Every structure is written in structure tokens, then in C-alpha cells.
Amino acid sequence: MRFLLGVDEAGRGPLAGPVAVGVVMMPEGFDVAREFPGVNDSKKLSEKKREEIFEMLTARVARGDARFAVEFSDAVLIDEKGISAAVSDALARGVRNLVGFTKPHMKDEVHILLDGALRAPPEFSQETIIHGDALVPIISLASIAAKVSRDHLMVALAAEYPAYGFEIHKGYGTKRHYEMLREHGLSAIHRRTFVHLDGRLK
């Protein structure tokens, strides 16, 4: 049996928190669009709809119809290596862990579909599709898995760093977030290379 993997990332642009890469694996021929009604690029869906589809995905995993993984690269890695390298690192971990978890040495039995400019490790058969998160349902699922998992993490981190309102803006550069940065400075999970204020933040 051959398998398809869909891959997409979430959280490339925020000022705080990790970037997330979602990887979804299903048997070739599985009709994702039919089995996940309304699936689309996570950015085009409401939070409620994303959560609904994410629950459907976890139910499919429980039934053995699918596997998925979400890997994170934290702010330290983003600052040290840059966002593109951080995404690539999380992507490689996600693909290799998921394929290895399912069946060791099965790289010849999978084909990977990736959104935008993403690339999988070179040992895998792969195809990059521009706007794949909107055009290819299994990539859409990966984008939803990445987005929902990252949002859940940011809500959890809000309890550790209550001054910043991460549960609301999820680390993105909203007006309120910048106000909190000016008042409290940078936290341990802020991307220092992403925050540009008036030079007073260190």
C-alpha cells in the first residue's frame, strides 16, 4: 500500500512562540474532501470550523485511517537559524517521525505533497504545490493540524506568561501585543529577531 503525506506550516509570522509544521498521512486514494466536509486552508476557516475538522482528524487517527504529527521549532531556534531553517527542521522531524512510526524503512512507499516553497528531506518522493493548502485537501488538513496545535500551545503558554495576552492573539503582532511588549519587555518565548520597536527592548 502506498501512502500520501500532506505538509504545511503555521505560525511563520508571529512575534512570539514556535513555528509549527503539520504532517498528515493517509492511504493513497483516501477521499479527504468527502470525508472532511469543508476542509480548506486553515486561514480561510473560522476557529470553530478548524476545531471541528481537527476533532474529525483525531477521530480518524483513533480508527486507524490516518496518522498525523505536528512538530515545533521554538523562538530560540528561529532566532539562531532563521525562520526558513526552523521550518525545515520541524518539517524533517515530522516527516521522518511519522513515516518511521508507521513502518520503518517505508520511504519508498510514500509520496509527499507540500504547500508553497516547502521541501521535504531529499530521500522522499515529493511534490511542492503553490497554494496547495487551498487546492489539495490533504495539505489543507496539515495546515489545520499545524494551526490548531499551535493555537492550543499558545493558550497554554498564556498561563505561563499572563502579561502578554497570548490566548487572544497567539503571538501575532497586534496593537495590544505591542502595547504589552512596551510595558513588559520580551519574554523567553519572544522571537527577538522579529520584534522591532524603538530600540528600548532587549
Image (spheres, helix red, strand yellow):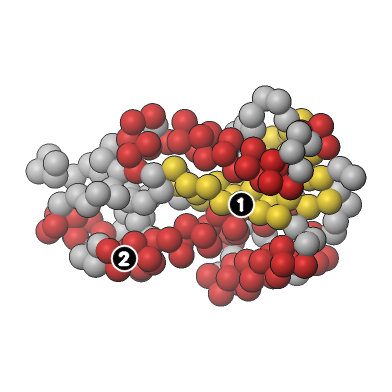
Instruction: Check disc 1 and give the amino acid type.
Output: Ala
Mark 2 lies on residue: 158
x 34%, y 43%: residue? 75
In-front residue for pair 136/91: 91
Instruction: Check disc 2 and give the amino acid type.
Output: Ala
Check residue 69 in the rendering and tell me which mark sits there, or answer none: 1
In the image: residue 103, left or right of residue 2: left
Q: Residue furthest left?
A: 200
Q: Which image quarter: residue 94? A: top right
Mark 1 or 2: the one toward you: 1
Name the secondary structure under disc 2.
Answer: helix
In-front residue for pair 62/4: 62
- Residue 96 place in picture, x, y as percent: 64, 38
In-front residue for pair 176/157: 157
Q: Quadrant of the C terminus?
A: top left
Q: CA distance from mark 1 to mark 2?
A: 23 Å
x 84%, y 51%: residue? 27
